[in-house]
Image: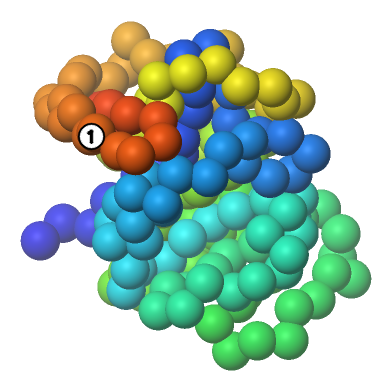
Amino acid sequence: MTRRIKAIWAQDQKGLIGQDGHLPWRIPEELAHFKATTMGQAMLMGRVTFEGMGKRVLPGRKSLILTRDPNYQVDHPDVLVLQSVEEVLNWYQHQELELYVIGGREIFCAFKENLDELICSEIQGVFEGDVYFPAEFPWKSFELVEQIEQETATFPFTIYKYRRIT
């Protein structure tokens, strides 16, 4: 199996992905999809996203934190703090896990040319927030390969899977 770098995120119908460093919604079924998809793999996030999660390390996954702060540290065996895109890509090339880019906005922008696949959960609703998925994302470089409708007790959502056009 070929390893891939994938982006995975949830957004509302207007592209909102965050509110004060947190998700603007709580949808257990979408969180379960995220967990099942990323389990046993590596996740890359920015420092703000990590801190928005309460600096909580998600079990069963390797967490890479990208920050410009050379003094930023996380004392956990499943966390690696890196300072550049190049460091992340070098790490990726020398290990066996798939890499899931999980946000935030700046991290999606920084890795847009390195992504092989996209997994977007679009929540059927409009929420209040302050961070949106990048409008300048190169969508024309990807094709939709799968669409899965999910009904929930709160907000239904659709999982869209895209693959880079080669």
Residue drawn at x 42%, y 66% as measured from the top left: 42
Q: Is residue 56 above or below residue 53?
A: below
Please provide percent x and percent y for residue 102.
51, 48
Viewer-side residue, 152 vs 164: 152
Q: For the N terminus, which image quadrant?
A: bottom left
Direction from residue 128 to residue 13 in the image, left or right: left
Corner quadrant of residue 145: top left
Taking the spot 23% from the left edge, 34% from the top edge, the residue there is 150
Residue depicted at x 34% and y 39%: 153
Q: Does residue 147 appear left or right of residue 81 in this picture?
A: left
Question: Which residue is tagged 1?
Answer: 150
Task: Reply above or below: 145 against 60.
Answer: above
Q: Nearer the viewer, residue 62 or 154?
A: 154
Q: Nearer the viewer, residue 102 or 1?
A: 102
Residue 11 placed where, x, y %? 49, 28
Classify 94 as above or below 30: below
Nearer to the camera, 50 or 77: 50
Does residue 2 appear to the left or right of 73 in the view shown? Answer: left
Identify the secondary structure beneath mark 1: strand
